[in-house]
Amino acid sequence: MENDISADVAIIGAGPAGLFAVFECGMLKLTAVVIDALAEPGGQCTALYPEKPIFDIPAHPAIAAGDLIAQLERQIEPFAARMLLGRRVEKLSGAAGDFALVTDHGETVRAKAVIVAAGAGAFGPNRPPLEGLAAFEAGGSVQYYVRRRDDLRGKRVVIAGGGDSAVDWALALRGIAASVAVVHRRAKFRAAPETAAQLDAAAARGEVEMVIPYQLHGLHGTGGALESVEVADLDGATKHLPADVLLPFFGLAMDLGPIAGWGLALERHHVAITPATCETSVPGIFAIGDVATYPGKLKLILQGFSEAAMAAHAIHPIVHPGTALHFEYSTSKGVPQGGAA
């Protein structure tokens, strides 16, 4: 049937770890299909901070998140993995060697093993409780993600929040936006100390306006076009900040969605795995990247890459029982051509 898709491994999540899992499976001649709820690959790297530099990818002193995803896509091209994007896995049944995953678009993916690389699960922004918010969201005046800094060139930008995203984007947009104002309820930020200090220095130079201690109180404008953001201090006194765009950075609402009902052992909304193999409590289902947890786990992209390799090697005997896997370095075996069939 047209909606029936078969592969050795079903990978749930097209973020960095999920994409690299395609490569590691391909190097072992395991075919893969990738399913992701977002409309394009990359996970949070694409959806939240494509232009933000990442500094801890080996051999890249700095690489923009979007460029990292582009390179990962290029790396997996030889394996021709089927990408099912804009889809969510609603049901999973079967056992190791014979799983069936059903998407919300009606496809049935049959696989011998499953890798959950769902990052933080399905995620969305924590929206501020402001009257008329939806109209300003629809008009593009309230945005939760910055895809391109240049889209905000010449705009009056108000940023709300006290974490890394708020501080990073305040620094990134100075000199690009017409003005940048940061609204936070207290003077201490939760961001990395170094970048918080950079923000203080930028404010001292007049590059950023610090609106402290205030919090969002209202939005004003017409037809979905923002004209000002109303903020209130701890005593209830209000003032208006001229604004074309509001960027509320109050974190993401994390939700594992249907994954939470698959019988996997969970710890604080993360999937518990065996570190040596990345296998979950359900045989044949593996978890890698930010969604996976175990003692000593570091939430780093490079650790997700390592976990992808371990999971692929643990999956090989499930797909090819009784067949010995002779480990070879990529420098000697090269990259298989023409797919991983």
Image (cartoon, rainbow, N blue to C red):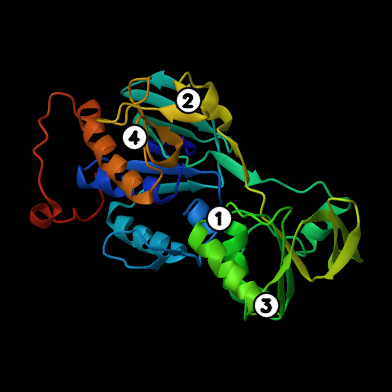
Mark 2, residues whose alpha carbon is within 10 Å: few (<14), some, or many (≥20)? few
- Label 2 to label 4: alpha-carbon separation: 14 Å
Mark 4 or mark 1, which has the lower sequence index? 1
Q: State the residue position of label 2.
A: 267
Residue 26 location, x and y as percent? 25, 46
The nearer-to-camera label among 3 and 1 is 1
**Residue 7 seen by the camera:** no
- Label 4 to label 1: alpha-carbon separation: 23 Å
Q: State the residue position of label 4.
A: 296
Q: Which amino acid does label 2 sit on?
A: Glu
Q: Which amino acid does label 4 sit on?
A: Gly
Residue 317 location, x and y as percent? 20, 28
- Label 3 to label 4: alpha-carbon separation: 41 Å
Can you tell which quarter of the image residue 117 is in? top left
Q: State the residue position of label 1.
A: 191
Indicate the secondary structure of the residue bearing disc 4: loop
The nearer-to-camera label among 4 and 1 is 1
Residue 13 location, x and y as percent? 46, 43
Quarter of the C terminus within the rendering: top left
Q: Which residue is drawn at 55% across and 49% down?
A: 38
The nearer-to-camera label among 2 and 1 is 1
